Image (cartoon, grey):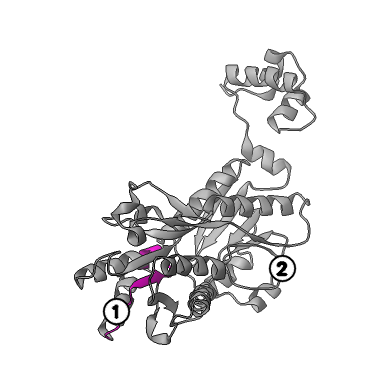
Amino acid sequence: MRVSLKDVAEHAGVSIKTVSNVVNNYRHVTPAMRERVQRSIDALGYRPNLTARHLRKGRTGIIALALPELGNPYFAELAATVIDAAAEHDYIVLLDHTGGRREQEVLVSRGFRARVIDGLILSPIELEPDDLRDRTGNVPLVLLGEREYDLPYDHIAIDNVAAARAAVRHLIGLGRREVAFIGARRGRSEPAQLRVRGWREELTAAGLSADDGLVAATDGWGHADGAAAMTRILETGRRPDAVFAYNDPMAIGAMRVLHEWGLRVPEDVAVVGFDDVVEGRFGAVTLTSISPDKSAIGRLAVESVLARLGGEAPEPRRVWADYRLVERESTLGRAAGEGANGEGANG
């Protein structure tokens, strides 16, 4: 039999309104009253009807999260953080896969699911500013990633240029002098452009070469793309002593090719990735990587949507999430003395 608010109220000896205030986490309830009602909730096994609660507010209790690559470990881990953050506010998350295609990103951003969602969190790749200027409706939109739109939407990102510079600075500090970059996307990709920019700025500041012969462009960002990019650089006769990859899967692909060419990581070539996905912590050589604060990104995105829904948000803002460089064996070698879960970090 389903336990109702009335049952809890009778058990606790309080009014139904008081129970409702506790269930809805209203601030004006005293700690003693909250504890009294909570004991009755626990004793009876009461579970709130979240659907009814949201419907009373004219909402569905669903937030959509649209990502370009669900198979990419970074986006899979990011989705988990958004789902966890939403659950803390009694929301569920509907996942959409755009494939990074502009037409799909336009479809999602213009609200084809508007009747079933309360808000949208979108990580665009090809979406243009004009696509968002034509957007109508009242479903809050929060953007993730590094595309610059200069439009009135909350935007959660990390500083890709600074993060890339930190990665290259780490390599230079280890005495590496010829640092390649793999993953400069052939098509338009602002994150790739920003990371190349950071790579180039840090090398130039150190008086080192940042010529185009050390940059390998790719069509995708997977393991095979990283392997192919590394192969192309080596086939030109160049022998960089370090590699900075656009992301971790590409770095892992590059390390496989280096092994096949008889080059040791990190003795001959040090490697740094980006995104700090779980896979990079469990290879034969653990991967040094830039680690964005994925938990903060997910939490900030959900909180931004809910603030818009509640009319509590300030003017649309760009929020910088934190990141850090996690140093592992691919740059420090076995002397790093860490296990698969070990984390040495520089901020």
Residue 265 in the image: above or below residue 279: below
2 or 288, which lies in front?
A: 288
Q: Which residue is mark 1?
A: 239
Vertical order, 107 against 326 (above or below): below
Nearest the camera: 19 or 28?
28
Amino acid carrying label 2: it is Thr
In the depicted structure, whether residue 161 falls above or below residue 283:
below
Q: Earlier in the sequence, mark 1 or mark 2?
A: 2
Membership of 333 in magenta stretch: no
Could you tell me which quadrant the N terminus lies in? top right
Which residue is rendered at x = 64% and y = 48% of the image? 60
Rendering coords of residue 65 (x, y %): 55, 57
Which residue is labeled 2 in the image?
136
Residue 4, x across and y down, in percent: 65, 24
**Closer to viewer: mark 1 or mark 2:** 1
Give the residues drawn in magenta, as a range.
237-250
Instruction: Give the alpha-carbon distance from disc 1 to disc 2, as whole Å.
Output: 53 Å
